[in-house]
Amino acid sequence: MTVQRQAGSEPGYSLEYAVTTSCDREPIQRPDAIQPHGLLLIADIASLTVLGGAGDIEGRLTPDWLGRNLASILDVPTGRFEDARHVSLSDLRISGLAGETFSVVCHAQDTHFLVELEPIESHNLLTWDIFGEIDRTADRFERCPDIASVCRHGATIFQRVTGFDRVLVYRFMEDGTGRVVGESRNDTFPSLMNHHFPASDIPTQARALYVRNRIRVIPDITYEAAPIRPSDAGLAGLNLSDVQLRSVSPIHLQYMANMGVRASASVSLVVDGVLWGLIACHNSSPKPLPEDIRAACRTLAGVMSRQLRNKEELVTYQERLRLRNAMESVTSHFDVRRPLENNLRSCINELQALFPCNGFAVISDETISATGVLPDTKSLHQLHDWLRAGNHGGIFSSALLGRDYPPAADWPERCAGLLAITLPLRTPICLLWSRVEIIQTIEWAGNPHKDDADSDGILRPRTSFRTWEQTIRGHSTRWTGEQKQAARRLRRVLIADDQTQQLRELNATLAATLEEREDLLRQKDFLIREVNHRVQNSLQMVASFLKLQARSASNDDTTTALKEAQHRIAAIGLVHRRLYRDEHVGVVDLGRYIEELMEELCTSLGEGWHDQMHLSLFPIMIAADRAINIGLILTELIINTSKYAYSGHAGPLYVGLAQAGTRLVLTVSDQGECTPQLKGTGFGTRMMNAVVSSLAGTLTYTTLNPGLEAVMTLPLDSLLPTETQPRPRDTSSQTPYPYP
């Protein structure tokens, strides 16, 4: 039965109350009382008015303390309390009424100042004595080879500094239990070295207080608690977590009495903010621990905690380095040309040596490759199926497999601990490292499973701490955190290797496909070039026939028509010649093409045209068939200019090619007669209109004075090569071809 205590209802609550309260819910940080060897003053943080206190304040400090100003009682300036966050009164020494001298410690908590006054002895440790002890202790810890040595030396040093009969180094285990890992004692107490204590001996809230308040002293467990008073001051339930004089739980006092301890001190060992363990000091008679000794103990505990962390980090680093080197050694033997499963089975001995184990297996749906001590084949397949069905993130570890997988309870001598990696490959594979059962005998300080209850059924603190042995079965050696991390790292490496191998296979297939495609493209290019070559020869033959026919014709009109046809054939033939020479089949640089076309037209039109021709051309890559159409239009415009503007003679002629946004602009202008061209209805004019229309373009004429300007605009989308051909070069920053 659990009873909830109402705050302030019972100052210095009793053992009968405490034992009926759940240990993890007992409000040990709010006892409403202090140990009587010191005094406590509680003041309002704003006005510094003393609202309450605990201990014999009237007989030891001042008779009229309640309601007075805290600064006047302590005889310090009010300014010492201006910044509540940084109030320090540790330098003060207050004289008492009975010849005592008190040290002062102040805590700011919400709206209150909590001021502790504790009597100090006149003979303190000298500062250089403390520093000398710390220096010697740090040097000795440095020379300790491992954690066990640090704990043994730590117990010896703390016993020498404190003078207690027995000093234990108590370490918290992963399951919450505690174990004595270091001890120094005289003959007053029996040895508890290597004894285990149940987790319930130090409840959760007590562990939190050990982290917050690193040292706790009980000079005499038979004390009578001094309650906070007056009872009507509204101070019931005040949090005394930071107060060193805080009264201790009656359960703990009875626990100490049952151990034969009259005085105790506990010093926390905190590593990286986590409670690693305790320095537990026991004495058979009342024994105070002066302020200077406590300060030395806090400092020595800090030195010891840092050394514990260093030793643990060294062990961790060495283990990680070993595992990393072993893993790299295993994977370096893999043959990249073989499937991952084959590599795993061929390196089975190297994989087994990766983690200390008794057996290792590589399991797939059909095959098991195993070595060492393992369950039978049927059990391994069933275990494999269970691991694949579980949600373990690909990694499973257990030092008590029979608890997690009940069938394993039948064969602990073959597999009591397991570390498994599940690989989600095309053929799922599982790697198993197995450890056999290790039968252990654990020494407990008293039977941890026995309930000490009176006839009334009320649970009370344990009364016996005699060695009680327990035999543990079904457990294997624990898998360390470094081993689990290495398993996760190995799983990532193996999955990456498998993906790399699949990618390598895909790349090989792709390379073969690309090579086959390149062969086909080379054959296609050869055939196209051969066709273009033959077409070029045929066009040259046709042009030659037209030229011969024009020479032999007796009619001027016939001769003119044949020459114009010859020019048109030449424009088409020029495209084919460029296709035959260019690297990219089906794509023509329109600027270069027009430049060469103008060169041939100037030659065929007669002398003088080379000097009169002015070109401004931007390079634009277009499809070859579109270049033929543009070449025909340009040829027709040049022929018309020669025929109508200059009556067959050479004259100024300007040809421009540019890109304006998404359109191509071709300009032909002259300075001759223009009227006949505007009214043309012949074959050439009809052909130009038809070609421009097929290209979704426009052809406009503008009369100059003198001359005529023809402007053809075409949308680039209809001229660009298809996506299987190279994209046209960007012309925005290109320099136009120079005038010839």
Image (spheres, rainbow, N blue to C red):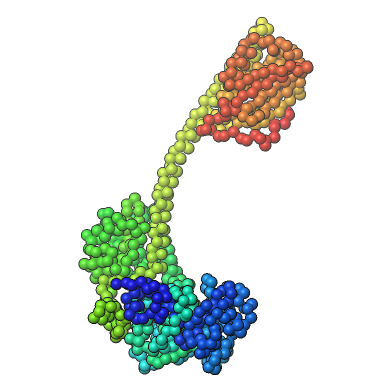
Tell how many labels. Answer: 0
Camera-nearest residue between 273 and 545: 273
Residue appearing at x 57%, y 28% in the figure: 717
Task: Name the quadrant containing residue 48.
Answer: bottom right
Residue at horizontal 41 percent and vertical 86 percent from the top: 224
Q: Which of the pair 388/497 is nearer the observer?
A: 388
Residue 686 placement: quadrant: top right
Residue 106 at least partly seen: no
Task: Establish if 541 lies above or below 98.
Answer: above
533 lies left or right of 654:
left
What is the residue that sits farthest to the top in this orientation? 555
Quadrant of the drawing holding the N terminus: bottom left
* Residue 340 is at least partly visible in this image: yes
Q: Residue at x 22, y 60 (%)?
A: 378
Residue 370 location (% of width, % of height): 28, 63
Considering depth in this image, is 30 or 321 the residue closer to the camera?
A: 30
Looking at the image, is 592 positioned above or below residue 246?
A: above
Q: Nearer the viewer, residue 444 or 87?
A: 87
| 713 left or right of 308 in image | right
**Left or right of residue 194: residue 103:** right
Residue 377, image x, y percentages: 23, 61
Quadrant, the C terminus: top right
Residue at the image position 59 percent from the left and 33 percent from the top: 728
Quarter of image, res 349? bottom left
Q: Position of residue 285 (x, y in %)?
A: 40, 92
Q: Where 120 falls versus 674 (above or below)? A: below
Residue 606 position in % (x across, y down): 72, 18
